[in-house]
Image (cartoon, grey):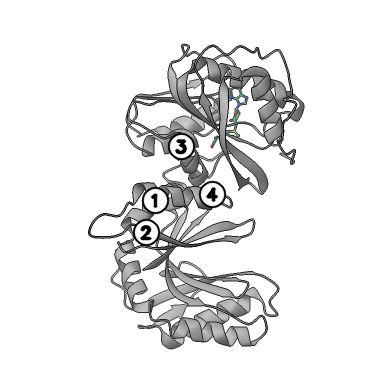
Amino acid sequence: MLYVLQTIPGLGQLAWREVETFIPGDSERPGPRLMGLKAVPGRDDLLMIDHRGGPRALLKLRASEDVFAVAARGFKIAYDERGLRQIHAAVRNADAVQDVLNTWRKATNSHKQNGTFRVIARTVGTHRFMRRDVGRAVADAVRDGWPGRWQMVEDNSDIEIWATLIESELICAVRLSDSEMRQRGKVKHLPASLRPALAGAMVLLTNPSANDVFLDPMAGAGTLLLERAAAGPFAEIHGGDINGDALAAMQANLRGVRGEISLSRWDARKLPLDDGEVDKVAVNLPFGKQIADETLIPGLYREVLAEIARVMRPGGRLVVLAGNTSTLESARYGAARVLRPLDRHRVIVLGQTATIHEYVRESGPNRVRPSEPARRPDDDGDDYAA
Ligand SMILES: C[S@@+](CC[C@H](N)C(=O)[O-])C[C@H]1O[C@@H](n2cnc3c(N)ncnc32)[C@H](O)[C@@H]1O
């Protein structure tokens, strides 16, 4: 069956990496195949995958936000009024509908043969019809052709049908996930809090292992800590924040999570941790827009990176989300050169471009001091607004 995984813009490749890693094939059944990676610009990345198993494993993925089963596809959809008739025909006559409805029943523990639906329509391209016309064409097709009796409603429907028209290609899919896949039990959210799928992708990049002593030194509401706890066994999790409200939110979010978890109010520039005590660090540094003065950011980055380098063991992995690559890289070069850069992944966070940076902590002492600002002469970091 064809499924669509939906995630945050820029995370598509990492979401696929998670699928490949955690849903491998075996001798009886091949693993999922990536059939296409598409973008609804600024909104979502969509991965179309061919997966022979049921949806259960997909619904547990951490770098995706939603899972859909593809009911109908349309190709060469015209940009003018004829396109609407093509969409109606593609959705009404789709062969996969019965299987998709059965999969939806399985995923949602429903026995409904009849019920309500709503259509969420999205278009990318310069079509001569409106988004709502696409919604209407799809709704008519469902009523006319799908097995059972389905009544359209505005809200609180049994079934959500997402119709995405990207240029001349239509993907019409039934949502299998509910809001929990996006929220992940997070009860408190702060203005600068990460979406759990982004935190989930960052945690995956730390290569979680059962012996991990994991740290988020600027943890806000604790989204990265929650995702690390969900990613599998760990030895210890340490999280903290300078702000008392953030600590309260973090405590509320991690209540009920079992294991060695210590949450503190601290200054990330002076952590109460020993040299080399930590294996993995994931951190979302303040971008300097919502919660910190922008002029203080370079100095803060230098001091925090130097402190992270101190508490990490050689070979440990650091994953940083930052809004401005050149600010981060010149801080690292000036204060924590022992953190060697690996890959980068560009994403959209709260409507802004940001980058996930991976580092490994090399062996030996960190020979630069945070008081020595320096800009790497060949720094190719791009200076987009953060
Ligand atoms: C971008 S937010 C982190 C959001 C977090 N990842 C979440 O999902 O909620 C950055 C956090 O850094 C904290 N912070 C700023 N300066 C700090 C410092 N010197 N020590 C510790 N935390 C600090 C802020 O209070 C804020 O909560």
Question: Type of residue at label 2?
Answer: Pro
Disc nearer the start of the sequence (1/4): 4
Question: Type of residue at label 4?
Answer: Leu
**What percent of the width, then of the height, locates residue 302?**
66, 20
**Residue 11, numbered circle:** 4
Q: Residues within 10 Å of mark 3 (few under 14, many from 20)?
A: many
Residue 367, quarter of the rendered image? top right
Q: Which residue is mark 2?
A: 32
Mark 3–mark 2 distance (CA, rounded to whole Å): 22 Å
Secondary element at image label 2: loop
Which residue, as the protein is rendered here, is positioned at the far left? 28
Disc nearer the start of the sequence (1/2): 1
Total number of numbered labels?
4
**Mark 4–mark 2 CB contact (< 8 Å):** no
Mark 1–mark 4 distance (CA, rounded to whole Å): 14 Å
Question: Type of residue at label 3?
Answer: Val
